[in-house]
Amino acid sequence: MAEIQFSRGVKEEVIPEVRLTRSRSGNSGTATFYFQNPKALSIDNMEEITGMYMIDEEGELIGRDVNAKFINGKPEAIEAVYLMKSSDDWDRFMRFMDRYAKENDLGFNQS
């Protein structure tokens, strides 16, 4: 089990585009998630967005840098940034992403 939530207990069904960067030393990194038309921004959703929660069998990773993108006054996307401040944080995030990718048939392209 690996899922992403923006409100506790409400699974986000839209699969994001994810971009990763890592420092040359390997001691820090950034993951930027982009969700186009996510369920969390739908009119039917009455839950408040309190962060990005990445949940799997090891526990929970929490990102607080979550921003909605608006076009012509309507919510269109969510961009969330997750910071990793150590190589242990990076390894834990990659384990989550491996599980999430397997569950959602995602691939990895290295540039």
Image (cartoon, rainbow, N blue to C red):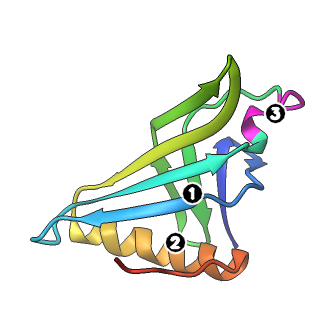
Q: Nearer the viewer, mark 3 or mark 1?
A: 3
Q: Is 12 above or below relative to 27? A: above
Relative placement, left or right, of 109 versus 72 is left
Q: Amino acid at mark 3?
A: Ser
Percent position (x, y) of residue 27? 16, 66
Q: Amino acid at mark 2?
A: Phe
**Residue farthest along the left direction in this orientation:** 25
Image quadrant where residue 42 sits: top right
Q: Residue at x 43, y 75 (%)?
A: 94
Q: Residues within 10 Å of mark 1 (few under 14, many from 20)?
A: many
Tag 2–tag 1 contact (CB < 8 Å) = yes
Query: Is label 2 in a helix, a strand or a loop?
Result: helix
- Residue at which label 3 appears: 42
Rounded to the nearest angstrom, the CA distance separating label 2 from label 3 is 26 Å
Q: Which residues are magenta?
A: 40-45
Q: Earlier in the sequence, mark 2 or mark 1?
A: 1
- Residue at which label 2 appears: 96
Q: Earlier in the sequence, mark 2 or mark 3?
A: 3
Relative placement, left or right, of 93 versus 102 is left
